[in-house]
Amino acid sequence: MYMKLNWRKSPGYSYNTLLTIIFVFAGLFTNAQANLPQWGNFSAEEISMKECSFDKEAEAIILLDEGNSTYDDDFRLITQRRIRVKILNKRGLDWANISIPFYSKDDFESVQKIEAVTYNFEQGNNSTFTQLDKKTIYKVKKDAYYSMMKFAMPAIKEGSIIEYRYEISTKRFSEPDDWEFQYDIPVAKSSYLLEVPPTAEFTYQIQKKQSLPIIVKPIPGEGKVYYEMNFIPALRFEPYMDAARDYVQKVTFQLAGVADRQGHKVDVNITWRSLAIDLMTQKYFGSQLDKDLKADDLMNLVKAETSDFEKIKTIYEYVKKNIIWNGYDGKYANDGLKAVLDRKKGSAGELNLLMINLLKTAGIVTYPVLVAERDFGKIDTLYPFVDRFNKVVALADVDGKQYILDATQENCPVGLTPYPLLNTRGFLVDKKIYNLIRIAPGNKSYKNVITVNGMVDSKGSLTAEAYVKSYDYARQIRLDAVKRDKRRFINENFEKPYEGLAIDSFLVVTPESDSIPLEQNVRYKQQLNESGGFIFFNANLFTGLEKNPFSSSVRFTNVNFGFPYDVTLEEKIKLPEGVKVDLPKDKTLVSGDNNIQAVRQVSFENGELKVLIRFVQKTTLVNVNAYNEMKGFYKNMTDMLNEPIVLKLPN
């Protein structure tokens, strides 16, 4: 056995340590075995536990998560799993509804040998146990690829301990899935034992917080390695967080080599160069990009365009409008691009590989780029784990400018980098100029310009009309939201955040071209708050800055805004004659690094109240170590913007 260890900090966040180790098992060690509790045997501490000592907010705790993976003589991967959960309070009862996901396409994986028991403990250590009726287990198809075995544990109440186990097996050889030690409830103990066949070589990568220790123990003589972590707090949702998988404590595996029949090692994509060459020669990836798809009608339209930029737009819009995205990601065209073009439907990988083919046919220099969207998780830039990418997109190079295109982004025009890719890295796939690239918003931002005109009557009722023009990322995101659910969009952006506001009419003007902003027009009434004969008018309307999103005292993840922000609000409000106005002072707040600025200016002249609010944020990614500073700035900013203008109306 040999192993290569490389301890290093993970790029992008400082608290995570990655360990990359390559093992080739040759039976050089003697046997060792972990000491884990037996099925149905519980400690006094587990029985009496009322709360989790290392995560007191928890509604439930995973007492044990045990996995054991091995390969049989046919190189099928067989994993045995056992999970033990304690329900701490009523909020944790949902953890008794069990779902076991598996890859069901072509029956590649199957789940069997499910057993489950609920244990309840009464005073005096009297206990009852209720076994799961296997007739209540059922299968649910999640999508074309995955299904779930589901069941509800019986006799559940606060204080119950549930324990279940099952076996999952593959039809043929497969890499082990990631082993995750962490969930959104705490875990007391998580262990994984992997046996690797002697003809295979895997790399594994450990991602963990520095303060949480891990046991990694090769087992002599058996070609196995054992992993264990203990007392792992929950990883919960945080505003503007990166993908949870970027922070979850886990170990990831990838095949690095196999032995041929003569016992010689054959490497499997251990460098970015080898991955690029492999992909560009694969039947369902690179080999599809130069095929003649006989798209003559489209090419005639393209030839009529006088610039390469317009040719790109023509092909991009053609694929978006004529080929339906089936909702799945993907990196390959498993049925071939001709089949995708004929059936006019496909995955993200199929749509984008088709677009690359058509762009190349039109003479546009275009490359496939493997990407990992922000909510999918970061890639490891030092090792080519292809499974860390969830789709392929196109990169077109024209006149020194590069355009990243994703045909699944319906409302994203050419020139606007798709926002799910912002602050990520992609892998440009080419035999010669393969490269890791950083994907950023460039000079684009989330930009809203808001204009409000209205009047307040003698009873403190505001009648007004607001015009909102949304540009760049605000345009795309709001167009997506309106088309998805217009009523919800109106409620979340124009009603819900504002007490007493009632909308009379709402109009969206869909832009006819990419260069025109999305226009929203809203007419509304709002009864202003009154106390002691004074009216309180909050001028902070429709900015999205009404509430500080960073309220937690503790932050575990980086803050990823994705894009810069540029928000301007101008208001002109007519007030009743004889009103007295107490104006707050004009203020400008600037962050310590000068990357965030907020301005509020208020004036009153000739019976008209004028308000200007401006928010500009250049930073798009904030390290977790700077969280408290940013949290404090946002608190001061929202307090300033929400400071009311006090009106004393005439009697």
Image (cartoon, rainbow, N blue to C red):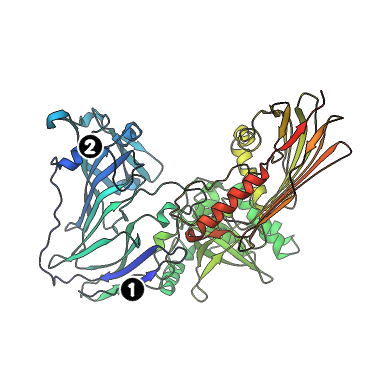
Q: Is residue 622 left or right of residue 158?
A: right
Query: Where does residue 162 sit, x and y in percent of width and height?
Result: 22, 37
Residue ID at (89%, 38%): 606
Q: Are marks 2 and 1 in contact (CB under 8 Å)?
A: no
Query: Where does residue 384 sit, x and y in percent of width and height?
Result: 40, 68
Depth order, front residue of 384/552 = 552
Query: Where does residue 541 sit, x and y in percent of width and height?
Result: 69, 39
**Residue extending furthest front?**
532
Residue ID at (19%, 67%): 198
Residue ID at (48%, 54%): 242
Q: Is residue 428 left or right of residue 578?
A: left
Amino acid type, callout 1: Asn
Query: Where does residue 320 sit, x and y in percent of width and height?
Result: 61, 50
Q: Quadrant of the N terminus?
A: bottom left
SS state under label 1: strand
Q: Earlier in the sequence, mark 2 or mark 1?
A: 1
Q: Is residue 335 visible?
A: yes
Quarter-wise, where is residue 154 in the image? Answer: top left
Quarter-wise, where is residue 141 in the image? Answer: top left
Q: Is residue 578 left or right of residue 314?
A: right
Identify whether 437 is placed above or below 557. Answer: below
Residue ID at (18%, 42%): 45
Residues packed near mark 2 inside 10 Å, few (<14), some (14 to 19) or many (20 plus): many
Separation of marks 2 and 1 at Cα, in angstroms: 39 Å
SS state under label 2: strand
Identify whether 602 is placed above or below 122. Answer: below
Return the residue at label 1: 6
Return the residue at label 2: 162
Depth order, front residue of 151/557 = 557
Residues packed near mark 1 inside 10 Å, few (<14), some (14 to 19) or many (20 plus): few
Q: Quadrant of the C terminus?
A: top right
**Residue extending furthest right?**
606
